[in-house]
Image: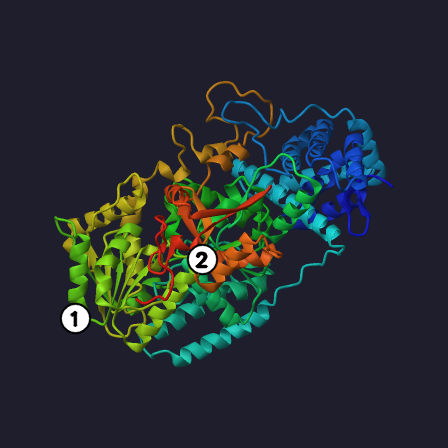
Amino acid sequence: MGFIAHYRREDDTPQLLANHLREVQAHCEEIGAKIGAAHIVGLAGLFHDFGKYSTEFQAYIREAIANPDAPPKRGSVDHSTAGGQIILQLSKELPELQFVCELVANAVYGHHSTLLDFLDENGQSPFVKRGKLHPELKSMLQHFFQEVMPASDLKNYLLAAHAEYKLLKRKLQKQGVLHFFLAKYIFSALIDADRTNARLFDENEERTLRIKPPFPLYEERLQQALADKQKKAVPNDITKARQYLSDQCFEKATLPTGIYTLSIPTGGGKTLASLRFALRHAQLYDKERIIQIVPFTTIIEQNAQETRDVLQTKDLLEHHSNIVEDRDVEQLTFEEHEQRRKLHRAKDNWDMPLIFSTMVQFLNIAYEKSSRYTRRFHHLANSIIIFDEIQALPIKTISLFNEFITFLKDVCNTTVILCTATQPALQNVKHHITIDGELIDDLRSILPSFKRTNVISHVRDDIWTVEDVAEFAQQQREHVGNILIIVNTKSDALRLYEQLKGQGGVYHLSTSMCPAHRQHILAEIRDKLKEGEPLICVSTQLIEAGVDVSFQCVIRALAGLDSIAQAAGRCNRNGEVAARDVYVMNMKLPKRHFLPTIVEGAHQTSLLLRDDESNAKNLLSPDIMNIYFSEFYNAFKHEQHFSINGKEYTLHDLAFSLDGHWLEGKILSNLQHHYAFKTVGRYFEVIDSATTAVIVPYEKEGKELIASLEARDVDDFSQFLKKAQHYSVNVFAHERQKLERSQMLALYETPFLRIYYVREGAYDQDYGINVQGDAELGFMGI
């Protein structure tokens, strides 16, 4: 028996190390070829398990095979360090390769964990300190030359990698951005190729080649659906304008790969219009997948279902959140390791033609330290990414977002569409993007067709209390059949709902509810709106972005101008009458420390209203919106680069600095790179307050998911996790602590993962998660 990489116990079959290295290399080359880096990425595949040539590892795996009942602890033999070390040794013979080899070596070092800091906050280099040179390095290299690739071929391979690197440098002038994301891309390709190869060996299967997505069939079905929709639509100016916007998107699909804005007004049909662009563009430029990124899970639920229905397909990945919380473990038994690999297999790696996910998940791919996120990176290449409601991009991530999509366009051949009725001018900030064009010609001539609301300012010297707003809503109810009230916090929504619910026909929507719960409520609201039944819906801002509902009256707590525009988009959405009223009221704002963007947005809007009373009539015009975003971004100009508490440098410095200028004192390494990958991942979080996903016992399906956990009866983690996304809620740390104190939080735990869920007393049909543990489940009678 030769050198062994893995062992399949079911049929007593070893996987030879040489085969594993060559197969992972081939897969890495395919992934690397998408960005012109086949040899750079292939180099990581060639050497990732080079350390398994060591005498120690071969003894370890043979002992595991011989003693299946008492195998050695996994992780007791380090097999990843030697591969990185040999790559660095080879670069010494060809000094011009040092830039490339350092990036590849880091990916090899971290392929079972994460990328290391080249330079950390203490001026140290964990990368340089990664273990002493392996004593068998020379003999292991000889085995490699004999079994995998001769020395002469390897030298040519390295030179080819260097040639690719020189071409990549021409694509993107920002070298810090290029190197940071190139390392991420290499790492993504390696861990996906390695895990895929190990899975295929475990299951005794062959890797199948990529099947071209049926985009022509999807386009045909979309065109038919649009034609049917047009026939049923009310023949008014809005219907004509929607058709014009959709046709414009189709015509502009011939544009080359780039970053484009799509500034369709609220209610303009941007979901299907952008999909029409994407399906045509994908065929013209051979793109592999279409990805839609949204700010809130509520939009995923609606848009994903609409897309499934229109395209008549199930080949759509709907990725909300991560139910599983990975545990960092140093050592696992062989059996535990196999279970962990099955779990990683179940986690979606975004290898689907159609994907719907959130901004949190998207940014985590680039900056979070966990390999479960980074694995998806290479699937963003040669794709079309549609960012819905881009104005909701968190302020602190602006610079990081802009650098990321610039790399995706310039290096990864990915087309980016920034969709919103209120474009946030990302091209005008310090670390800006280059916009290649707007997809809609003569946009200003279209806007009057969508003028279907009157924004009325009720901002006054004294604030509107919850009781005041409830009374005003009841007065309005005498004149209109249905009202939507949107407030800034969950607590305000809950208090307002309590004030109104005794009137009957009152609904409450909150992110404290799981997605399935919210969808059921929205479905009931839509049915009542369609039948003309009177109702009041009290919601947080989750209803603003992309939720397709149309109320006769909207009341909006004072907020940012973009939020008011989105709220107005839920009023008289289809132009049922000439115009309806949207009232803006200054309720008590949360403390700036907790919700700074909401407070600042409300402040800037109030200034616009104060400076010119006529602004209320034109509050949502492009000119005033541009003024708003200019002032709003200026107020956060220092926060746009992701500030770190107590530090003078930012996350942008840690990620993209070429020389480590952010570090005071002497840099203690002579490396070409100084990027702090692991430190960036440790600091990075899109949402300031860390949350925990918990599964909730909503209706039969949620209860069955929890029952399967309690019985420890989860056979197919892939199906379990997909279903669990619809029955989970993200809770903040203080909410989690209250649930723990009331003994309402339970835990499914293995040596390598945790899944949290709550007991029935912690979930309420009216409010969702109830941290006090005194919820009532049962019939939802609102």
Q: Nearer the viewer, mark 2 or mark 1?
A: 2
Q: How is the image coloured?
A: rainbow
Q: Quadrant of the C terminus?
A: bottom left
Which quarter of the figure has residue 574? bottom left
Discs 2, 1 touching: Cβ within 8 Å:
no
Q: Residue at x 41, y 53 (%)?
A: 295
The residue that label 1 is drawn on is: 478
The secondary element bearing badge 2 is classed as loop
Q: Earlier in the sequence, mark 2 or mark 1?
A: 1
Q: Can residue 325 be seen from the camera position used here?
A: yes
Name above or below for residue 317 compared with residue 26.
Answer: below
Residue 104 percent across, percent down from the top left: 65, 36
Q: Quadrant of the N terminus?
A: top right
Q: Can residue 406 be seen from the camera position used here?
A: no
The residue that label 2 is drawn on is: 697
Residue 442 percent across, percent down from the top left: 36, 64
Q: Residue at x 77, y 24 (%)?
A: 135
* C-alpha separation, residue under disc 2 versus residue under disc 1: 38 Å
Instruction: Please state which amino acid type lies under the numbered disc 2.
Output: Pro
> Which residue of the protein is positioned furthest toward the bottom in this rendering?
231
Q: Residue at x 25, y 72 (%)?
A: 534
